[in-house]
């Protein structure tokens, strides 16, 4: 039975895969519009944003618009570059993860997409929203998700270098080398198909041996060790799934994309080129339907070691990320941090430009993509009222063009639940959600 399912799945993917990279063609007819894919994208920046009080020094750099909210809001200097996208954006004020509010201010990047509470003796995370989406429709694409961060890898608990966590809360390593990412998604593999098949077959054989051995080992363990062993087996299963996926797509050519304009050798010493290229790689992955789920962590919360921490200084700003965040309420601090916020918003605006200008069906790539952009602090070490915005999703029921002010009792999980539901992920709840966020629905 297992072999039959395995064959059918491969056959389906090979048959569908040849058309995955095609744009929507008029000759396909209007009736095909309902089959267009939906996507989830989340971008995170650390340490909060410039939030001087209205009317105070530097309030023109306030991340949130001034006033009581609504559709007639005015961007301050930090987000002014997003004005061209105002009809595709909702700025959300007041949200945070309820369990996370009492955690340390540097411990919250791990929980941005999970809502879990991490505390001494309990540093185990829960599944992230993006990976729930990847489980739902990742089998339709060559890669179930694209996980990116500037620092790469997984980091450490409470100082994570990835936004993405699997079903058992295990961190999913993030990629951070543009050229490696490009080659994995779009590069031509010089190895022969026969060699690749042999390597995948060897991997499958080794996994079979691991499973066979595990039956004997697990029965000899105590309850606590069995739980740890089950987590190990879950990791093994994720490897098995990757092997199966690689086998399924082996005969499907990778999409042909134009690398012109990509800074594939950019690194942490060229922040503008590096961040723009990471956005470009997400765009290309969506545009070719190589994946429908992507996350990008611009910097982690480990101020001492994060290679992204020096980005502001390399751009001519007076301090590193952590220093700017700590100085937000000092003389000139609101402007200094605001200029970093401004730079990040300009990078986001460019990404939205590309998504909006790419046609798909009767709309754009952005219209069927939900983009969540934000941070897990408001001011330094404050885990309440986190700056965030959503973009896109016009064709899947999101209402934009507004500054939304919510009460502190509303959990951020309500937003994540809503975004998942709008991309047709079958979930009734997420983390500590209470209901869908009707304010962002059309």
Image (tube, grey):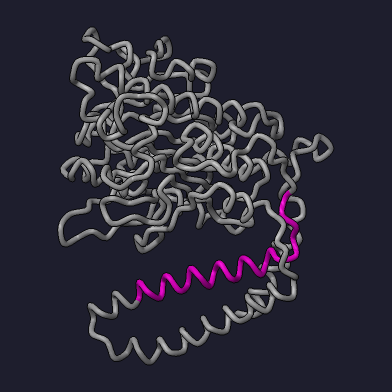
> Horizontal and vertical percent for residue 439?
39, 27
In the image, residue 339 sits, relative to residue 320, either above or below, namely: above
The answer to whether one can see residue 149 in this image is yes
> Horizontal and vertical percent for residue 32?
73, 41
Q: Residue at x 27, y 35 (%)?
A: 322
58 or 428: which is nearer to us? 58
Q: Residue at x 30, y 47 (%)?
A: 305
> Horizontal and vertical percent for residue 211?
46, 84
Q: Is residue 112 left or right of residue 186?
A: left
Taking the view exactly as shown, the residue that stands out farthest to the right is 27
Q: Which quadrant of the rendered structure holds the N terminus?
A: bottom right
> Horizontal and vertical percent for residue 368?
59, 36
Q: Is residue 226 left or right of residue 175?
A: left
In the image, residue 80 sits, relative to residue 212, either above or below, namely: above
Query: What range of the chain is rendered magenta?
Result: 230-255
Tell whether position 256 is magenta: no
């Amino acid at each position: 039975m297992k072999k039959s399912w395995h064959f059918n799945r491969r056959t389906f993917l090979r048959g569908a895969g040849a058309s995955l990279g095609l744009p929507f063609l008029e000759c396909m007819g209007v009736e095909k519009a309902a089959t267009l894919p939906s996507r989830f994208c989340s971008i995170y920046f650390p340490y909060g944003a410039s939030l001087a009080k209205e009317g105070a020094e530097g309030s023109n750099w306030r991340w949130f618009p001034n006033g009581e909210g609504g559709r007639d809001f005015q961007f301050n200097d930090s987000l002014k570059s997003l004005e061209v996208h105002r009809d595709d954006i909702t700025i959300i004020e007041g949200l945070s993860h309820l369990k996370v509010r009492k955690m340390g201010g540097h411990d919250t990047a791990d929980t941005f997409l999970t809502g879990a509470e991490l505390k001494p003796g309990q540093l185990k995370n829960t599944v992230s929203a993006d990976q729930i989406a990847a489980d739902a429709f990742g089998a339709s694409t060559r890669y179930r998700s694209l996980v990116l961060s500037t620092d790469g890898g997984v980091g450490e608990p409470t100082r994570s270098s990835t936004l993405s966590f699997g079903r058992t809360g295990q961190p999913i390593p993030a990629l951070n080398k543009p050229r490696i990412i490009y080659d994995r998604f779009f590069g031509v593999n010089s190895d022969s198909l026969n060699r690749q098949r042999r390597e995948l077959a060897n991997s499958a054989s080794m996994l079979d041996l691991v499973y066979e051995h595990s039956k004997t080992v697990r029965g000899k363990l105590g309850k606590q060790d069995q739980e740890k062993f089950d987590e190990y087996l879950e990791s093994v299963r994720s490897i098995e799934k990757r092997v199966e996926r690689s086998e399924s797509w082996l005969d499907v050519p990778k999409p042909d994309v134009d690398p012109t304009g990509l800074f594939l050798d950019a690194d942490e010493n060229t922040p503008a080129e590096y961040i723009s290229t990471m956005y470009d790689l997400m765009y290309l992955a969506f545009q070719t339907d190589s994946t429908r789920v992507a996350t990008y962590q611009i910097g982690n919360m480990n101020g001492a070691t994060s290679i992204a921490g020096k980005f502001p200084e390399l751009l001519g700003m007076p301090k590193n990320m952590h220093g700017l965040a700590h100085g937000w309420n000092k003389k000139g601090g609101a402007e200094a941090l605001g200029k970093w916020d401004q730079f990040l918003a300009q990078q986001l605006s460019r990404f939205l430009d590309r998504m909006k200008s790419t046609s798909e069906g009767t709309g754009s790539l952005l219209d069927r993509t939900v983009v969540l952009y934000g941070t897990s602090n408001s001011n330094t070490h404050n885990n309440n009222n986190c700056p965030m915005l959503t973009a896109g999703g016009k064709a899947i029921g999101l209402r934009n063009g507004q500054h939304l002010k919510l009460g502190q009792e509303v959990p951020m999980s309500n937003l994540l639940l809503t975004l998942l539901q709008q991309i047709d992920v079958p979930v009734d709840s997420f983390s500590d959600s209470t209901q869908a966020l009707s304010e962002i629905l059309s």
